[in-house]
Amino acid sequence: MESSWVWIIVLLVVILVIALIETLLILKKEENKLKQYEAEGDTVENELKRSHEYETKSLKRNIPSLVWIYTITIIVSIIVLAVYIYNVD
């Protein structure tokens, strides 16, 4: 019985770590873009153009990725919790 507790906790921790890693990878990709822009030199026009591009393209790509990551994490966590509750009885 206690062994199942340990496995549930380990599984949840692994899932959360994977979600955190995916989030950090997306953040790192965006940071690399900013560093590249700074290295190339910036003008106000370029910054404005990138700002509009970010709003249209990057958010359409990153937000859905994060939503999927955390949706899967939450669903799997709920399933694991349900399995635990079902097995407690």
Image: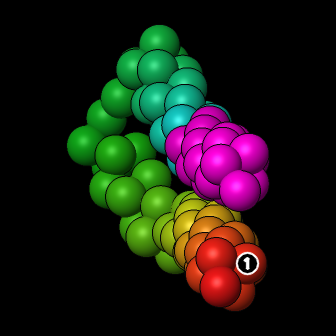
Q: x, y (%) of residue 55?
A: 43, 70
Q: Amino acid at mark 1?
A: Asn
Figure quadrant of residue 81: bottom right
Q: How far across and down, in percent of the image, does residue 35 sit?
A: 46, 20
**Residue 84, position in %: x, y?**
66, 73
Q: How many marks?
A: 1
Quarter of the rendering containing residue 3:
top right
The vertical placement of 52 against 6, above or below, is: below
Q: Considering only vertical position in the picture, is 74 above or below 31?
A: below
> Horizontal placement of 32 versus 76: left or right?
left
Main SS, magenta region, reads helix
Q: Quadrant of the N terminus?
A: bottom right
User: In percent of the image, x 40 and y 20: which residue is there?
Assistant: 38
The spot of residue 51 in percent (x, y) is 37, 58
Residue span colored magenta: 1-21
- Would you place residue 79 above or below residue 66 in this image? below
Q: Which residue is labeled 1 in the image? A: 87
The reply to whether the magenta stretch includes residue 12 is: yes
> In the rendered view of the protein, which quadrant contains the C terminus?
bottom right
Label 1 neighbourhood size at 10 Å, few (<14), some (14-19), many (20+)?
Answer: few
Was residue 41 drawn as part of the magenta stretch in this picture?
no
